[in-house]
Image (cartoon, helix red, strand yellow):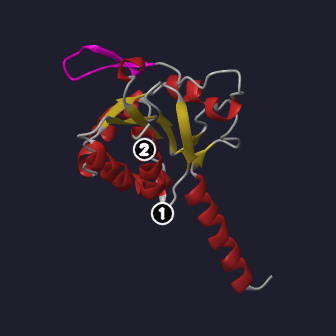
Amino acid sequence: MNKKILLIMVIALLAVGIFSGCGGNNPQKNNPAKNSTAESTNLAPDFSWKDSSGKIVHLSDLRGKVVLLDFWATWCGPCKMTIPHVEALYEKYKDKDVVVIGIDLDTAAHRNDVINFIKTHNMHYLVISDAKGTVASEYGATSIPHFFIIDKKGEIAFTKIGYDPNMEKIISDKIDELLSQ
């Protein structure tokens, strides 16, 4: 095999890796958005976190708002590429009925690294830790970055896996659609 063909194959494999995300082999397995039927609801799994004052907040407390969840980790290259887009979405919708939540999947041992990462990357939206992967498992997020948009009724309305240079527009269009309902 000549060097030119080998180079093309390597570039193609790298592109697939960047656009498909980091993680597991079957990102649709156990994905509530993909496993729903017409008769069942697509209710987003509930989870909780402590806010800055120590009060426990549940995802279900946000009903009536559109919620963007972003499962990510500091070691994931495509996740790093999505952060400016997620930050732009946060800035665009922060004064509307939209909540942006980054769900960090780094281990607890890397907590200080995550805090520094958030500061370095100017992440102003809410970031919570899922160091044990419990929430990611509930959502079937086996590959990251993995985005979920939850509508005002608390149902998963849209999912997106991996980096896409057009992701900001794609997600923004879906949020606008849900806000108008």
Residue density around tag 2, few if under 14, some if 14–19, many if 20 or more, within 10 Å: many
Residue density around tag 1, few if under 14, some if 14–19, many if 20 or more, within 10 Å: few
Q: Is residue 103 visible?
A: no
Tell me where residue 56 appears, x and y as whole percent: 31, 13
Going by the numbered disc 1, the residue's amino acid type is: Pro
Residue labelled with disc 1? 165
Discs 2, 1 touching: Cβ within 8 Å: no
65 in the magenta segment: no
Quadrant for the N terminus in the image: bottom right
Q: Is residue 104 visible?
A: yes
54 in the magenta segment: yes
Q: Quadrant of residue 103?
A: top left
Q: Residue furthest left?
A: 53
Tell me where residue 100 appears, x and y as whole percent: 35, 38
Tell me where residue 42 appears, x and y as whole percent: 60, 26
Q: How many marks?
A: 2
Vertical side of 67 occupied by 14: above or below = below
In this view of the protein, which residue sits in the foreground, 147 or 152? 152
Residue labelled with disc 2? 175
Q: Quadrant of residue 12?
A: bottom right
Q: Is residue 46 left or right of residue 122?
A: right
Instruction: Tell me what residue is drawn at x 25 percent, y 43 percent.
Output: 124
- In the image, which residues are magenta? 47-59
Instruction: Tell me what residue is drawn at x 26 percent, y 41 percent.
Output: 94
Going by the numbered disc 2, the residue's amino acid type is: Ile
